[in-house]
Image (spheres, grey):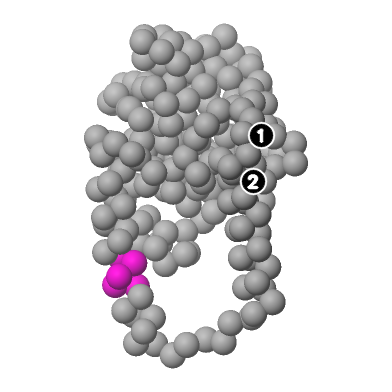
Amino acid sequence: MNSKTVHHPETSMLLEFSAGTLETAASICVSAHLHFCAHCRDSLLRLDQVGSKLMEDSQAEPVDEALFASVMERIDRLEDGASEPDKYSQVGDYPPSVNKLIEADDNPPLWRRLSGSVDVASLKTGQKKFEVALHRICAGGKTPKHDHGGLEYTVVLKGSFSDERSVYSEGDFILRKPGDTHQPMGAQNGECICLSAQSAPIKLSSPLGFIMNNLLRINPR
Ligand SMILES: [Zn+2]
């Protein structure tokens, strides 16, 4: 899509993504960013070329043909389903990696109210290390100030938001580490929808934190 993104994943993440060793939730976020970012798609292409050269030079491993066939069949099913209209209209139309997650879920996620300005739709990813979800911040909405007990990846899918450090627009990739504190605020000109993966429940640091802490906790699906 557009190539105006200014916040990108680190090269080490792209390297792991290329090698297929990046953790599932992080891969979903990188994949969503790549949908928007031509710069990172170019970097990934170069890394893939280096990787395939290394593979050529190493000895081939035998492939489990039954496993390979079942994986390909699953991918085909997902691709067929993605063309059906309305199946994921309950949450919206997103980059293919996000659409596939929604499409593969027998109970498509629904928006739930988290606070006056924020809704959440949890995504099922088949792993438990990260809670992966879509967050929707209404125009001008403020989320509670919070810090992080673990890693949090965020990709802006629609609109924009800001915090104390910067403004983040469509496609931007943000990594928050343990100890980081911020208070995201939706742009005034429209709602903002983000994909996020949190490795641990966030801790609220505002005076209302003790009430909001439980509300913000996403139920793993
Ligand atoms: Zn990028």
As displayed, is residue 144 above or below residue 89? above
Marks 2/1 in contact by CB < 8 Å: the verdict is yes
Residue located at (26% from left, 55% from top):
42
Quadrant in the picture for residue 6: top left
Instruction: Tell me if I can see residue 12 in this picture.
Output: no
As displayed, is residue 163 above or below residue 53? above
Query: In the rendered structure, which disc, 2 or 1, sits on the residue that comes first in sequence?
Result: 2
Residue 81 numbered tag: 2
Residue 83 lies, in percent from the top left, at: 58, 42
Residue 48 painted magenta: yes
Quadrant in the picture for residue 215: top right
Q: State the SS at label 2.
A: helix
Name the foreground residue: 63 vs 30: 63
Name the foreground residue: 171 vs 137: 171
**Tag 1: residue type?**
Lys
Say whether mark 1 is within 8 Å of ligand 1: no
Q: State the SS at label 1.
A: loop
Give the alpha-carbon distance from disc 2 to disc 1, as whole Å.
9 Å
Residue 87 numbered tag: 1
Q: Is residue 92 left or right of residue 56?
A: right
Highlighted magenta segment, given as a residue range: 47-51
